[in-house]
Image (cartoon, rainbow, N blue to C red):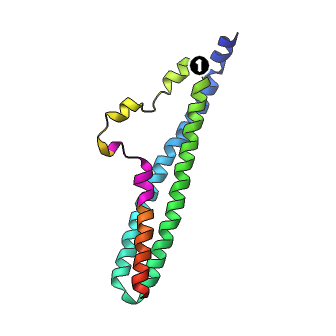
Amino acid sequence: MAQQSAKSDGPHYVEALRTLYQLWAEENRVKTQKLTTYFTAQSILLTAFNLGPDSRALVAAVGAAFCLVWFFSIGRTMAFQDIWKEKIVSILRVAPISVQAAFDFYPTSQDKKNLPWYGRLSATYVLLWPPAVGFLVWLVALGFAAA
């Protein structure tokens, strides 16, 4: 009886997994857009910092503030992506075997070992370190500009 119930729930699992996977995948696009925006804004701020000695303190303060905003924004995006992944995994634990096989796309530890070193870097380093370091650099620049 339980086997029959699991089979009839199969489409429900598939639809839920599709929706969660779409949410998870959409966060990748959002992270890419945020990273592009971050580096574009930093380039503009760096140009403004070098062009106007009278406004360096203001530009450095804006740069530091932008780094903080971006740090928390991308952190939130990454947190939501983790939530979607956890929900996918929790559904896969109880889904019928046929559904589990169809959605078995997460890399295993062996898959990760086969990647080059730069492919094994955590997204945390790639996405959160630039604004963290940028914040510190802008604070140092602000200190020099204010002196």
The percent position of residue 108, horizontal first and vertical second, equals 42, 30
**In which quadrant is the N terminus drawn?**
top right
What segment carries the magenta color?
119-129
Could you classify mark 1 by the number of other residues whose Cα lies within 10 Å: few (under 14), some (14-19), or many (20 or more)?
Answer: some
- Residue 125 counted in the magenta span: yes
Closer to the camera in the image, 20 or 70: 70
The furthest residue to the left: 116
Residue drawn where x is 31% and y is 37% of the image: 115
The percent position of residue 135, horizontal first and vertical second, equals 45, 69
Q: In this view, does 14 lie to the left or right of 122?
A: right
- Residue 61 counted in the magenta span: no
Q: Is residue 88 left or right of residue 122?
A: right
Closer to the camera in the image, 85 or 145: 145
Q: In this view, does 25 lie to the left or right of 4?
A: left
**In which quadrant is the C terminus drawn?**
bottom left
Return the residue at label 1.
Answer: 96
Q: In this view, does 144 lie above or below 70?
A: below
Residue drawn where x is 38% and y is 79% of the image: 48
Q: Which amino acid does label 1 sit on?
A: Pro
Q: In this view, does 24 lie above or below 34?
A: above
The percent position of residue 91, horizontal first and vertical second, equals 60, 29
